[in-house]
Structures are given as C-alpha cells and as structure tokens.
Amino acid sequence: MVLASAVAMEIDSYAAFTYAAGIAGNLLAFVLFVSPIPTFRRIVRNESTESFSGLPYIYSLLNCLICLWYGLPCLKMSGMLVGVFAVFLLVVYISLEMLSARGRQTFVGYLSVASLISMFASPLFIIGLVIRTRSVEYMPFYLSLSTFLMSISFFVYGLLLRDFFIYIPNGIGAVLGVVQLALYAYYSKTERQAERLPLLSS
C-alpha cells in the first residue's frame, strides 16, 4: 500500500514537471515569435531589409505548420484550417495517402525534427557576415536568446515525455543557441572595445 502510494506520488510529480516544461516551452515560443518585432520596425522605418536574412522566418513558418500537424491528437486533414505552402501540402498528402497511422507519425515526426533543426540553424547563415564585419548588428540578440530558452524548455519537455522527435531537435537547437549567444557575446565585446579605442590622427 505504501509502495503504491509512493509510485502514485512519483507519477503525479512527473506529470506536473512534464506539464510545467510544456507550458514554459509554449510561453517561450511566444516570446521567440514576437522577438523579431524590433527588427521588423527597423526594416519598415528604413524601407530596406539591409543585410538581415529572411531565412529564419521562412523556416520558422514551415516548422510551425509541420509541428502543428505532428502535435494534433489525430493526424487528420480536418485539423488544418489555414492555407499552406506546396511543400506542406505534399507532406500532408504523403502522410495521409501512402502511410499507415504508425508510419505517418514516424514520417511527420522526422520531418518535424528536420524542420526544427532548420529553424534553429537558419540564424547561423549570418555567421559569415558577423565574422567578416566583426559586428553583430544583423544578428538580433533577442531572437537568439528566445530561441535558446525555448529550445531548453522543449528539450526538457521531450525528455520527460520520452519523445525523441521533440528532445533531439530541441537539444540541437539549444546547442546552436549557445553558439549564437557566444558569438554575440564575443563580437559585441569586440565592438565595445573598438569604440573605446582613441582615434588615430594622420
């Protein structure tokens, strides 16, 4: 009786931690998606995208659509209420028409892993520009920070659920987030030091 009670308490605690990690992941995902607002304002104000990359936003949209499909209680077309890109329509068609329920979950799960990794890696395309210019002007800090925090939350959530379709890509996302933040810290420090250097007279 005591053992059964202890097991029940452990299960309740596990469920609570899983739920908390999922809630944190969703809240930080919201922060991630609103973090580019300062960048959008700058683009609108200057009427130019300058050297900002659009890839993170394209990959994020595709990832959201695929993860929405993966996260539905049942993988049915009735769950899709929004227009989608041709790539996404192809994914849905293949998963519904050519695969069994189990195969469908695996197929869409692997696609969600690939799309998540693409989303997390997309800001890294700007690394060449950051290194070349020695400036982090075009690598928004809040986008990198919110990506890292959201990845950590969903990594924990996936571990608790034992769902490697969640914890593997988010674990990779957390590592890539650390890389971005380290790059930002290094080059922003370099910029500050350069600003403090005295001007040289000819």
Image (spheres, rainbow, N blue to C red):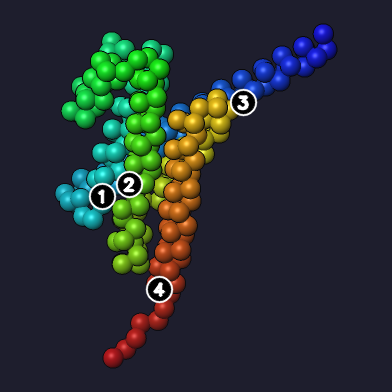
Q: Describe the element under mark 2 as helix, strand or loop.
A: helix
Contact flag, marks 1 and 2 (Cβ < 8 Å): yes
Q: Residue 162 in the image: state x and y as whole percent.
A: 55, 27
Q: Secondary structure at mark 4?
A: helix
Q: Which mark is residue 194?
A: 4
Q: Amino acid at mark 4?
A: Ala
Label 1 to label 2, Cα distance in Å? 9 Å
Task: Measure the C-alpha gap from mark 2 to mark 4.
Answer: 28 Å
- Name which of mark 4 and mark 3 comes first in the sequence: 3
Indicate the quadrant containing the N terminus: top left, top right, bottom left or bottom right: top right
Q: Residues within 10 Å of mark 4 (few under 14, many from 20)?
A: few
Task: Tell me the distance, in whole angstroms, between the alpha carbons under discs 4 and 3.
Answer: 46 Å
**Of the residues shown, which amino acid type is indicated by label 2?**
Ser
* Amino acid type of the residue tagged 3 in the rendering: Phe
Q: Earlier in the sequence, mark 2 or mark 4?
A: 2
Q: Earlier in the sequence, mark 4 or mark 1?
A: 1
Q: Measuring from the top left, give residue 127's x and y in whole percent.
A: 34, 58
Q: Which residue is mark 3?
A: 17
Residue receiving disc 2: 122
Residue 34 in view, yes or no: no
Callout 3: SS: helix
